[in-house]
Amino acid sequence: MLRVRIAPVLVAIAMCLLWGGLPMTASAQPVSVVLTLLPATVTFTDADPDTTPTITSPSMAVTVDVSGDNVPYSWLLTLAATNLTTGSATILISNVTWTATPSPFVANGTVSTTAQTVASGNTSCVKKKCTYLGTGTFIFSLANSWSYNAGVYTSTFTFVLSAP
Amino acid sequence: MPALARQNRPFLITALVLGAVIPVFAATTTKTAVATCTVTARAKLSLSSGTLSFPSADPDSTPAIPASGGALTITAKGRTTINSTVTLVVVASDDLLSSGNRIGIAALKWTVSGSGFVPGTMSKAAAQTVASFVSSGSRTGTQSYTLDNMWTYATGTYNTTLTYTLTAP
């Protein structure tokens, strides 16, 4: 009797292994997240603060590509950046804001040294293939000021895409 | 059939349990972009008036004639490298001249208000400091001119040109 009850369990485990359904294999419900920044630069050119109180950078295309199987996934895109620095001079990154289109990219916000959500969403499923693919256009703006000391400042913008 | 169903029950339960615990593995990717901001040295100066006038007055009752337009408001904006000094100076082209007569330019003096602004005496030989500031910024102050009044001045209308220079190295 014992042999009769155990056998189906072993068969089931074996079938799940063959099917690739064990939790130890990531392929059970694979999630692929791909993030693309184009260009991967933000450039603020010099300008007179009186005539150009806000300096805008060329637009950046941020493409989010999330895919997985069987169930819809939520995804989150965050942005954090270091202050703009050159030598001992600093421009606080809070002087930088963004605008973004379309939804689900967050329309506007202030860049911070702590991660800010700039987009979030869910994959949608068709025949057990669940995906999200979208591109947001970001424009970053710097509040211009006479108080900035001369120099070439740099900062690192870090985008993190995670799912689920 | 009931016997077969009972036999399959462990298989179904096992499959369901295995299916239920299949986790969704978190996936994360990070991309960075380099931001560059160029700030060049620049200076911008504005004066509230382009002329100064000193009316005739009795030297005894008015030994120093204030400019009729009142204080000159100066806005000095400068961008420079950190800890460098932005400097505003003024120099006269010559003494006050009127048809061969002259009033020594040192008769023109000023007082000031505003942080970084300093009082002084006009010169035609060397630029005199009106204000100086450390590092970048926009500063506003006033400069109140007076002309020393003397009985020795010949009558006439005197003129000179004052040149202000703001430097942000």
Image (cartoon, helix red, strand yellow):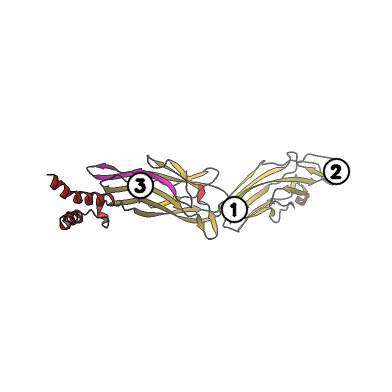
| Of the two numbered discs 3 and 1 in the rendering, the one whose residue sits closer to the viewer | 3
Callout 1: helix, strand or loop?
loop
Q: Is residue B76 left or right of residue A111?
A: right
Q: Is residue B68 left or right of residue B89?
A: right
Asked whether A128 falls inside the magenta stretch, the response is yes
Q: Position of residue A145 (x, y in %)?
A: 55, 48
Q: How far apart, in angstroms, are the residues tagged by discs 3 and 1?
A: 43 Å
In-front residue for pair B64/A23? A23
Q: Residue at image x 26%, y 57%?
A: A25
Q: Verify CB contact (< 8 Å) between mark 2 and mark 3.
A: no
Q: Which residue is mark 2?
A: B59
Quadrant containing the C terminus of chain B is bottom right
The mark found on residue B89 in the picture is none
Q: Which residue is mark 1?
A: B136
Q: Position of residue A55 (x, y in %)?
A: 48, 46
Callout 3: helix, strand or loop?
strand
Q: Pointer 3: residues within 10 angstroms few (<14), some, or many (20+)?
A: many
Can residue A38 be seen here? The reply is: no
Q: Position of residue A148 (x, y in %)?
A: 55, 52
Is circle 3 on the same chain as circle 1? no
Q: Which residues are magenta?
A: A110-136
Chain under callout 1:
B
The mark found on residue A75 in the picture is 3
Chain under callout 3:
A
In-front residue for pair B144/B158? B144
What amino acid does circle 3 point to? Trp
Residue at the far left in the pictured view: B1
Q: How far apart, in angstroms, are the residues tagged by discs 2 and 3?
A: 84 Å
Q: How far apart, in angstroms, are the residues tagged by discs 2 and 1?
A: 43 Å
In-front residue for pair A84/B110? A84
What amino acid does circle 2 point to? Pro
